[in-house]
Amino acid sequence: MNERIKLEELTRKVCEIAKQAGAYIREERRKFSLQNVERKHAHDYVSYVDKGSEEKIVCALRKLLPEAGFITEEGTTKVNDSSSVERQSSDFIWVVDPLDGTTNFIHQYAPYAVSIALLHGKEVLVGVVYEVCHDECYYAWKGGGAYMDGTPLQVSDQKIQDALLCLQLPYNSDAYKPIINHLISHFYGQVGSIRMCGSAAMALCYVASGRYDGYAEKYIGQWDFMAGALIVKEAGGMVTNYEGSDDFTQGNNVVATNGVIQPDLLNVIKTA
């Protein structure tokens, strides 16, 4: 069977897994209480819903591709970014964020999403992001284009003066404050407008769909951006790290744009 066809079939199965996790998140939100919230770090929250979603996703992915390892945000597989026998023993790695935008979820504020990517070395083969609030499934496989519920995605062609930028505020506020202050000081009043949405995965999907023209964030996990990065690239956009390298999979920062404004964002970031 053609490798592209295999990836397409795999992607569609991952979409179903992401939607099932999303249905669980949606149902739990109806009865969710702030008493269920735990703090991981300052302003960084988690709940039983994050953990329950991850357990469901990991169980389904194990059946789908038994030989693959995992990088997961909540560590329900006892596999994390720092040490893992399982992670090192497989050529294929699932990168899972079971609920990206937990703070949004807690406050009933859209968007929040499930994000699943499949890595082979430093190559992202599959990316799926399911946005729970609006029931939108974004997905891509290497060489196959990017889609939202079957509709092909294409990045915008806006130039920087008319661009809608997403400049997120990560939890590591002390380290990032000088950078974000520099970015906002430079771009505020010089671009179309600036937003933040509270979900890295969805910011990337919004770049892929042309809703945003560019996005930048640092101090985030691989699970936050891996799936969305492939979706942006397959939609015709550009993804790099803050240094401008397209080898972004091992870092903690990402810049994603329609390609037209990539130099504008990178030039300002490098002077921060």
Image: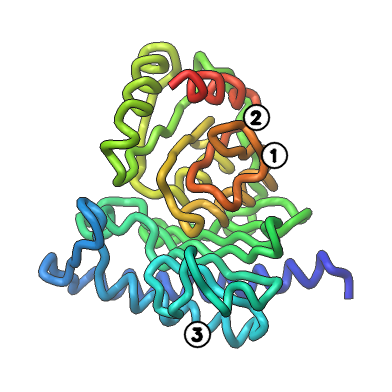
| Cα–Cα gap, marks 1 and 3 | 33 Å
Q: Which structural element holds mark 3?
A: helix
In the rendered image, residue 55, in percent from the top left (x then y), is placed at: 41, 81
Do the CB atoms of the residues marked 1 and 3 lie less than 8 Å apart?
no
Q: Which residue is under mark 2?
A: 259
> Which kind of residue does numbered mark 3 sit on?
Cys
* Of 81 and 137, the residue lying toward us: 81
Q: Residue at x 34, y 55 (%)?
A: 101
Do the CB atoms of the residues marked 2 and 1 lie less than 8 Å apart?
yes
In terms of image quadrants, where is residue 63?
bottom right
Q: Which residue is under mark 3?
A: 59
> Which kind of residue does numbered mark 1 sit on?
Gly
In the rendered image, residue 77, in percent from the top left (x then y), is placed at: 45, 80
Image quarter (top left, top right, bottom left or bottom right) of the C terminus:
top left
* Of 264 and 69, the residue lying toward us: 69
In the rendered image, residue 37, in percent from the top left (x then y), is placed at: 18, 66
Of pointers 1 and 3, the one earlier in the residue sequence? 3
Q: Residue at x 74, y 56 (%)?
A: 142
In terms of image quadrants, where is residue 45?
bottom left
Q: Residue at x 55, y 25 (%)?
A: 266
Q: Which structural element holds mark 1?
A: loop
| Cα–Cα gap, marks 2 and 1 | 8 Å
Do the CB atoms of the residues marked 3 and 2 lie less than 8 Å apart?
no
178 relative to 4, above or below: above
Q: Which residue is under mark 1?
A: 236
In the rendered image, residue 210, in percent from the top left (x then y), is placed at: 56, 36
Q: Residues within 10 Å of mark 2 (few under 14, many from 20)?
A: many
Q: Residues within 10 Å of mark 3 (few under 14, many from 20)?
A: few
Q: Residues within 10 Å of mark 1 (few under 14, many from 20)?
A: some
